[in-house]
Image: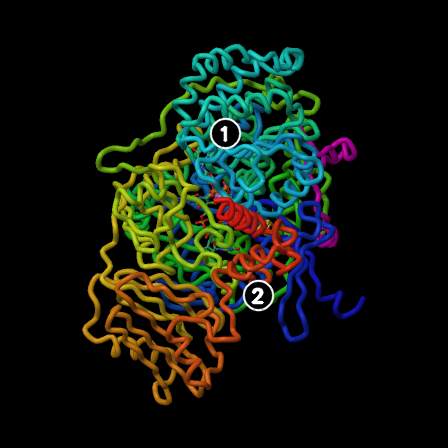
Amino acid sequence: MTAEAAATVRTTCPYCGVGCGVLASRAADGTVSVAGDPDHPANAGRLCSKGAALAETLSLEGRLLHPLIEGRRTGWDDALDLVARRFGELIAVHGPDSVAFYVSGQLLTEDYYVANKLMKGFIGSANIDTNSRLCMASSVAGHRRAFGSDTVPGCYEDLELADLVVLVGSNLAWCHPVLFQRLSAARAARGTKVVVVDPRATATCEIADLHLPLVSGSDVALFNGLLAHLHARDAIDHAWIEAHASGYQAALDTAQSMPLADIARITGLGEADILRFYELFAATAKTVTVYSQGVNQSSAGTDKVSAIINCHLATGRIGKPGAGPFSVTGQPNAMGGREVGGLANMLAAHMDIENASHRHIVQSFWQSPGIAARPGLKAIDMFRAVADGRIKAIWIMATNPVDSLPEADLVRAALRQCPFVVVSDIERHTDTTALAHVLLPSLAWGEKDGTVTNSERCISRQRPFLPAPGEARADWWQLAEVARRMGFGSHFRYSGPAAIFAEHARLSYIANAGTRDFDIGAYADADGAAYDALEPFHWPRSLEDYTASRQRRFFADGRFYTPDRRGRFVPTPWRQPATAVSAAWPLILNTGRIRDQWHTMTRSAKSARLMRHLAEPFVEIHPDDATRLGLASAHLAEITSAHGSVVARLLLTTRQLPGRVFVPMHWTDHFASRARVDSLVGAHLDPVSGQPELKHTPVQIRPFPAAWYGFALCCRRPVFRSEYWAVAKAKGGWRAELAGLRAPADWTETAHALLAGNGKQDGLDVLAYFDRSTGQHRFAAFEDDRLTGALFVSPEPVAVARDFIADQLDATFSAHTERFRLLAGRAPAGRPDAGPIVCACFEVGRTRILEAIRGGGGASVEAVGAATSAGTNCGSCRAEIGELIHAACLAKAG
Ligand SMILES: Nc1nc2c(c(=O)[nH]1)N[C@H]1C(S)=C(S)[C@@H](COP(=O)(O)OP(=O)(O)OC[C@H]3O[C@@H](n4cnc5c(=O)[nH]c(N)nc54)[C@H](O)[C@@H]3O)O[C@H]1N2
Ligand SMILES: Nc1nc2c(c(=O)[nH]1)N[C@H]1C(S)=C(S)[C@@H](COP(=O)(O)OP(=O)(O)OC[C@H]3O[C@@H](n4cnc5c(=O)[nH]c(N)nc54)[C@H](O)[C@@H]3O)O[C@H]1N2
Ligand code: SF4
Ligand SMILES: [Mo]
């Protein structure tokens, strides 16, 4: 083996649930590069912008490297002793339900397995829940109602074999980009029809034959109507229902209670569009319905899932190549967490906590003193119990609830007064680590070692290729050490992740014999070497039935996991979302993701390249609403709900329905002055799944009365006292958007303080310019001809070539004319301004793409790619390039 080959490790992307295989290579000088793994079944070599930028997020800057108690560095022994002692004391006095774990779909399966075993088996409480409650809980509940188990029937290939793909509440282009690429390629090759059901016109609509911008929360009405229509059109597979399902008539009765006119009124869609969708569905046997957070994160989330599954059961379109309902998971290991039973209402290995014989299987396998006999508190209730003192100690792992749970300010207050908070994270400073009594440093991607399961039940290895930094240790190790110190040592003596995986595999297999879907018994005896060599595989993989269990789809035989092995229809009466608009809160807030950021940005924001796509918290609003409310493009707005308020940049767009606004979920107190969107969102839960309604919050919005706006570029992370700020990594430094309610008395002084904060003060050469007519101040700092910082202030939003300027840190400006052009906010001659970056891989900006389109070289995304390279690597920006072409055509036509 060559030295080069030895340094390449096959691992899995730590971001979304597509679960792409990654080849990580470490050069002799330590630099890491990543590429898509051509042999991984999920991506066959592809990566999206986030995956392709993984190497840029590995810096140790900001990492948590040592255990801390009350903010002071300590050793592992002291930290772990304290955790075990405090948990033990509280359990002894107040009982096992006085403590809780709040974990995450970003843990590895092995970490997750140990956490669940410790809490449910040995502490004896089911108070372990996970951020999957905010993510997949409604799908889990919907699956269990219909199938008797939490089973995802299909696989990715189905998207390529289907003739119709319906995307419901899924922005696949930005959130599952590689799956989107696979679907786009299939569509180009075989003319797959695509329908997008989403209140917003997202980047995903670029490949839609039909976009249904329904009123949010109305999906159940739409799919009830579909079931009734399928019945009326005689598109029902009665023979299949007869043989394999029950409850059809009751579901149909409910569905038929709503005439088309009502559905049109409730969904806000035209009858013709609704019927076009219904006809397409009725006529297309090979239909896959993909759904995600527009479905799950709803107070009717479980009913939305059931309404979709009903239509698939009714047509027998399940578990067949190119046909089935398909819940795409968000996090890299959302599925693994479900497999180990990480939710408060599950057991382990897809067994049920309410089922006595399942409890017996698990308890005797674990040889635990007891086992939790009833479901524990689900995430929202768990934090309510922290708030009212029922829970007195909580251990949070790999999630940032102060930012991601609804009513986030209450979550923060609850943790602030909780007697004992332990947080395991990889970053020193997050909004949640700030409240920890004990902070435990975990291994990050590239260091940690274990397995994850993606959306299509494919288990793959995450393998380390970097040494553990500082004193960071694996999450499973931290849990096992605490277990040992609580007196359960003999049950948690693992030599490494391989031993945990084998135990997990054994549990999946015992007393199973085909009665439970999750079975990876084939790996029950996998030793370290087998584990190291583990190839990605799809479950089930049973021990005896090795070949038969290699099937890629469930339910093809029409046998489900209900007691009578029949699939179940569930009647889904339509109901309004939990809250409605009122005079005080006249708009509905929708929240979600952007292409290049991951959740609370602790990792993706380390890449300057990823920050260039959208560098600031924003609110999307329809131009008519903006005009009515006196909101101007690029100005700032304050959005308020009954729970809190945020400030964000206004983005006017007709992609947004009137009466609705959209704010991304990503920004935290670490990156902006006031942009934690979950401080606005109410905790209204789906009654079955306990999943909160994160996409439907009544709000009001008004102009933020800024007296001045600013844009700054600094070598070091700047600190501001202005009422509004948002910072982002730039090449070699930081960029910042600023605004304030009152201008400082002396801008020169302010600018010098900010720009001197960059480094040494002497030798700093600050060029200043004041334009009396516009009231604009401009400053640029140089050190030996190199630009070290800049500040632009204006009474109106600053109009400068931001992306160009952000790239100039450390560039040489020897000629005075060049310095003045920079101060004017324009690109000097010979250094073209790329405009906002569209293609993150090749850093191709909007200006360059528009030039290519105008120059005639860009009538198609492919042609733009040939002319500029944009969109030719990961392809995540292809939808946006398509939009630019579309807009240019419209402009030409108009
Ligand atoms: N870039 C990026 N990718 C990610 C993530 C990330 O942070 N960044 N996170 C990952 C995770 S954990 C998850 S869970 C997934 C989420 O992936 P998605 O679910 O695709 O993403 P979201 O943006 O949360 O929401 C999807 C869409 O639901 C729409 N929607 C809102 N309300 C309704 C409604 O009532 N009905 C319908 N039909 N649609 C509605 C929204 O307008 C939005 O476009 O993404 C994963 N991938
Ligand atoms: N309004 C609104 N709110 C939402 C959503 C929405 O669409 N709208 N989406 C919801 C959904 S679907 C999700 S999944 C959640 C996501 O929300 P969170 O889970 O809170 O978000 P992350 O930023 O992924 O948090 C992961 C944390 O774990 C740390 N970390 C990373 N790797 C490791 C590791 O290996 N070990 C340990 N111990 N720590 C690690 C990171 O630094 C980070 O602090 O947000 C939910 N909240
Ligand atoms: S689609 Fe992108 S973020 Fe998701 S697993 Fe693949 S490379 Fe990672
Ligand atoms: Mo998620």
- Residue 374 in the image, given as x and y percentages of width and height: 45, 30
Side (left or right) of 395 relative to 847: left
Judge whether residue 496 can be spotted in this image. Answer: no
Q: Amino acid at mark 2?
A: Ala
Image position of 758 with respect to 364: above or below: below
Residue sitting at 37 percent across and 85 percent down?
760
Whether residue 541 is in magenta: the answer is yes
Q: Which residues are magenta?
A: 528-554
Q: Which residue is mark 1?
A: 141
Q: Which residue is mark 2?
A: 468
* Mark 2 residue CB less than 8 A from any atom of ligand 2: no
Side (left or right) of 771 relative to 156: left
Q: Secondary structure at mark 2?
A: loop
The residue lying toward the viewer, choosing from 640 and 197, is: 197
Q: CA distance from mark 2 to mark 1?
A: 38 Å
Residue sitting at 63 percent across and 22 percent down?
560
Image position of 808 with respect to 240: above or below: below
Whether residue 547 is in magenta: the answer is yes
Figure quadrant of the N terminus: bottom right
Q: Amino acid at mark 1?
A: Ala
Q: Earlier in the sequence, mark 2 or mark 1?
A: 1
Local crowd at mark 2 within 10 Å, few (<14), some, or many (≥20)? some
Residue sitting at 54 percent across and 68 percent down?
469
